[in-house]
Image (tube, rainbow, N blue to C red):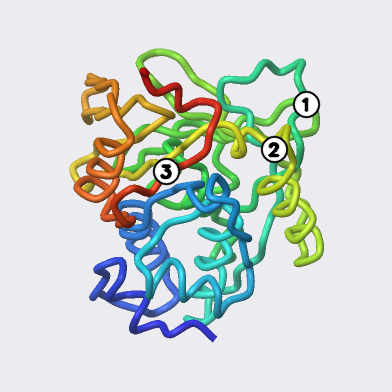
């Protein structure tokens, strides 16, 4: 059982807790702006434990982040604890991938039933929407950050994000639920298989309350403003990476910590 008071203190939400759309949107925005998406334990060779107590110890008590199976499993536990009718769904992440390519079904997000169906996803990295998305809506939907839409094609639903005049796939899904055993298998692949992109690159991301976003991909630290303007910095040393993790994501690691990763091509 998740300690709801501890969770709300973690994300800085002190508003209503009734199972309403207003509460859902407030939680999603606060969570995505506070708990960073990150795969650092994968690079350190540490196991990713999906049991509720383990999620609470890591994401709440230790003030760490995680990836979709951790982030959205925690969100699911919180929402059900508040009395929401919430269910785990599976998806394939498609951002920056061609439609001809079929990625593994290794994404978890949440369907919430209110007066109608809503989708919540705080675990898709720099693409995590900061508001729930109305499942029945096919046109653009506003969020505190980028516009989103749910495009229906080929018997699938594509969650898309808009940058400028262009729409980009974030993930695809069929509304199939993802029971615990499927999450265990997909989490094992994501965190241990040599072909998993989380094993060979460092990824950290967080939404900013002002509508911008910050993220790290390997050595590149990016600040994206609400207006779409981006500033990129190339990190020079492992110690500089630790400083950025601490100052911008509140992720604290002991001095000298190193993240074994092919993508971290530090200059010699």
Which residue is tagged 1? 102
Asked if the residue under mark 2 is in contact with the one under mark 1, i.e. CB atoms within 8 Å, the reply is: yes
Q: Is residue 88 left or right of residue 184?
A: left
Q: Residue at x 27, y 70 (%)?
A: 13
Quarter of the image holding residue 206?
A: top left
Q: Residue at x 63, y 20 (%)?
A: 97
Asked if the residue under mark 3 is in contact with the one under mark 2, i.e. CB atoms within 8 Å, the reply is: no
Reading the chain from its start, which is encountered first: label 2 or label 3? 2
Q: Is residue 150 left or right of residue 221?
A: right
Q: In the figure, 117 relative to 164: above or below? A: below
- Residue 153, how many percent across, how many down? 72, 26
Distance CA(mark 1)–CA(mark 2): 8 Å
Which residue is tagged 3? 258
Which mark is in front, 2 or 3?
Answer: 3
Which residue is tagged 2? 92
Reading the chain from its start, which is encountered first: label 1 or label 3? 1
Q: In the figure, 117 relative to 223: above or below? A: below
Q: Secondary structure at mark 1?
A: loop
């Amino acid at each position: 059982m998740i300690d709801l008071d501890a969770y709300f203190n973690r994300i800085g939400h002190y508003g209503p807790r009734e199972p309403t759309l207003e509460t859902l949107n407030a939680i999603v925005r606060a969570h995505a702006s506070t708990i960073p998406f990150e795969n650092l334990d994968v690079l350190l060779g540490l196991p990713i434990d999906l049991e509720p107590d383990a999620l609470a110890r890591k994401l709440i008590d230790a003030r760490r982040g995680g990836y979709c199976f951790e982030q959205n499993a925690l969100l699911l536990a919180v929402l059900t604890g508040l009395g929401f009718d919430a269910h785990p769904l599976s998806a394939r992440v498609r951002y920056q991938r061609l439609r001809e390519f079929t990625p593994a079904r290794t994404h978890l997000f949440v369907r919430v039933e209110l007066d109608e169906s809503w989708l919540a996803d705080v675990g898709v990295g720099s693409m995590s929407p900061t508001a729930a998305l109305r499942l029945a809506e096919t046109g653009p939907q506003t969020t505190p950050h980028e516009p989103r839409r749910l495009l229906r094609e080929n018997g699938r639903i594509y969650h898309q994000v808009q940058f400028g005049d262009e729409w980009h796939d974030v993930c695809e899904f069929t509304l199939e639920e993802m029971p615990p055993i499927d999450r265990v298998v997909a989490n094992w692949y994501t965190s241990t298989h040599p072909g998993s992109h989380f094993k060979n690159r460092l990824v950290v991301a967080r939404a900013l309350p002002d509508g911008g976003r910050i993220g790290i991909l390997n050595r590149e630290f990016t600040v994206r403003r609400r207006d779409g303007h981006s500033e990129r910095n190339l990190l020079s040393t492992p110690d500089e990476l630790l400083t950025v993790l601490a100052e911008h994501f509140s992720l604290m690691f002991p001095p000298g910590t190193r993240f074994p990763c092919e993508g971290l091509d530090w200059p010699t």
